[in-house]
Each structure stands twice: as C-alpha cells, then as structure tokens.
Amino acid sequence: MSNKTKKQAPALSKNATKYLRGMAHHISPLVTIADKGVTENILTELDICLDRHELVKVKIRADREERATISEQLIKESKAQKVQSIGQTLTLYRANPKKPVYELPK
C-alpha cells in the first residue's frame, strides 16, 4: 500500500496549526468512521482524501476513549498530523509534495 512508503512530516509550527484550523473551519467531514471502526477501506479513502485535499476532517462516531484510540491509529497509519480534535471531529493534515494545496506560514 502506498501509505507505508510515506514518511512522517516534521511537526507543524504554531502559526501553521493556527492557519490550518482557520482553513478547516469551513470544510465538511469527508470520511466517517462508525460501527465497523477503522477498516482497510477507511484507510484507503483517507489516504486518497489527504493526497487530494491535504486538509481533511474525519467524523468519528464512538465514545471518548474509543475516539482517542481511533485518532491515534489514523494519525499513525496515514502519516498525517493532527490539526485539532473537537468532539467527534478530527482534523488531519498531510502535505502533498507534488501538488500542494496550502502554503503554510512559518
């Protein structure tokens, strides 16, 4: 699978995180995780969304402890970075080196 070859990016700066939170405010969740939890299909869909959009909201329908576990698993598997997590919504960012969507502040 392609996401195994991607490296974890360096941590986002405070300014970059703040910028991405502002950009994420107006987007809707593209991936929803419900009863079946994290499946191979979910990971594939998340990978495609991150490649195309860079900034993706994930809706996690689970209790608080399970959401934390799922969030960690998604971050690890997708090599993305957590921008923020509010309630059932997790916002992830992974830069696309070939076709960048966002130019992050330093």
Image (cartoon, rainbow, N blue to C red):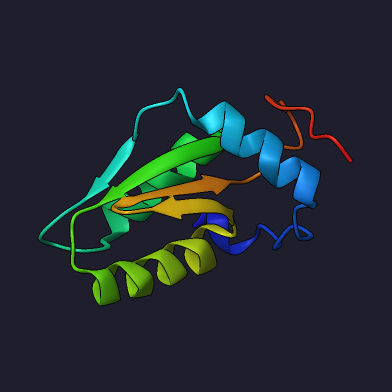
Q: Where does the image place residue 27, in percent across and percent down from the top left?
A: 43, 25
Point 69% across, 46% down: residue: 17
- Is 1 in front, or is 75? 75
Height in image: 14 above or below 70?
A: above
Q: In this view, does 90 lie to the left or right of 7?
A: left
As drawn, the residue found furthest toward the left would be 35
Point 35% across, 75% down: residue: 69
Height in image: 62 above or below 94?
A: below
Q: Is residue 10 left or right of residue 31?
A: right
- Is 91 in front, or is 43? 91
Q: Where does the image place residue 14, in percent across and percent down from the top left?
A: 77, 51
Q: Where does the image place residue 34, in percent across and percent down from the top left?
A: 15, 54
Q: Can residue 95 be seen in this view?
A: no
The C terminus is located in which quarter? top right
Height in image: 22 above or below 8?
A: above
Q: Quadrant of the rendered structure where residue 105 is?
A: top right
Point 49% across, 65% down: residue: 77
- Is 9 in front, or is 84? 84
Point 40% across, 64% down: residue: 71
Height in image: 92 above or below 75?
A: above
Q: Where does the image place residue 43, in percent across and percent down from the top left?
A: 37, 54
Q: Is residue 68 visible?
A: yes
Total numbered labels: 0
